[in-house]
């Protein structure tokens, strides 16, 4: 199923979010966006995406898009990423989602007081089996709640 993304920018204005985007052969095949309550990501709050893979021979590029305000106080976001495979097995890894460079300049596209950063998450990969996958992000920074996300 192809999901058009032409009006995506218009849909995202005024909304800080997490989005998972799959691109295969230059076509978007999965695109889901989730907004955080009150633009705050609290420890223990999960952002999860579930999707079905039908073609295990296709190579996919997976991007994570993180929206944040220019008032976000940090360079990055530490998070746990848990991937659940169709057979129920899980893989958990800690990642740093880089939003700014060492000098404090935002790495994403900014307009007004909001920015959107597209991070390459998995590039040129084939999923090993058909079925439903789940990718879950859990905030794991030193702060209990991160504002302007």
Image (cartoon, rainbow, N blue to C red):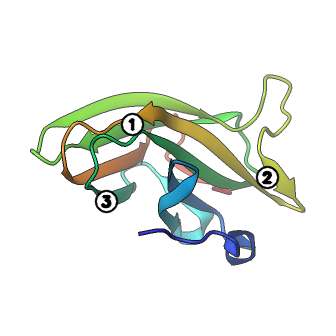
Q: Which residue is mark 2?
A: 71
Mark on residue 91?
none
Q: Residue furthest left?
A: 87
Quarter of the picture containing the C terminus is: bottom right
The Cα–Cα distance between marks 2 and 3, rounded to whole angstroms, is 30 Å
Who comes first in sequence, dot 1 or dot 3? 3
Q: Residue 77 location in percent, x, y?
A: 58, 38
Who comes first in sequence, dot 2 or dot 3? 3
Categorize mark 1 by other alpha carbons within 10 Å: few (<14), some (14-19), many (20+).
some
Q: Residue 92 location in percent, x, y?
A: 29, 32
The Cα–Cα distance between marks 2 and 1, rounded to whole angstroms, is 23 Å
Q: Residue furthest right?
A: 112
Viewer-closest of 149 and 60: 60
Residue 55 in the image: above or below residue 140:
below
Q: Which residue is at a point 85% across and 61% down the rendered structure image?
A: 113
Q: How many marks?
A: 3
Residue 19 can be seen in this image:
no
* Image depth: mark 2 or mark 1 in front: 1
Mark on residue 80?
1
Categorize mark 3 by other alpha carbons within 10 Å: few (<14), some (14-19), many (20+).
some
Residue 56 in the image: above or below residue 27:
above
Categorize mark 2 by other alpha carbons within 10 Å: few (<14), some (14-19), many (20+).
few
Residue 126 in the image: above or below residue 32:
above
Q: Which residue is at a point 41% across and 39% down the rendered structure image?
A: 59
Mark on residue 50?
3
> For the residue labelled by badge 2, is the local secondary structure a helix, a strand or a loop?
loop
> For the residue labelled by badge 3, is the local secondary structure a helix, a strand or a loop?
strand
């Amino acid at each position: 199923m192809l999901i058009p993304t032409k009006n995506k920018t218009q849909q995202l204005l005024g909304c800080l979010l997490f989005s998972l985007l799959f691109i295969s052969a230059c076509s978007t095949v999965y695109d889901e966006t989730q907004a955080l309550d009150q633009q705050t990501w609290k420890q223990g709050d999960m952002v999860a995406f579930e999707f079905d893979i039908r073609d295990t021979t296709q190579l996919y590029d997976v991007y994570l898009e993180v929206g944040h305000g220019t008032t976000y106080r940090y360079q990055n976001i530490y998070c746990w990423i848990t991937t659940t495979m169709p057979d129920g097995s899980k893989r958990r890894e800690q990642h740093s989602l880089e939003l700014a460079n060492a000098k404090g300049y935002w790495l994403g596209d900014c307009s007004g007081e909001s920015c959107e950063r597209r991070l390459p998450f998995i590039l040129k990969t084939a999923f090993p089996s058909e079925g439903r996958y789940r990718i879950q992000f859990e905030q794991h920074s030193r702060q209990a709640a991160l504002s302007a996300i």
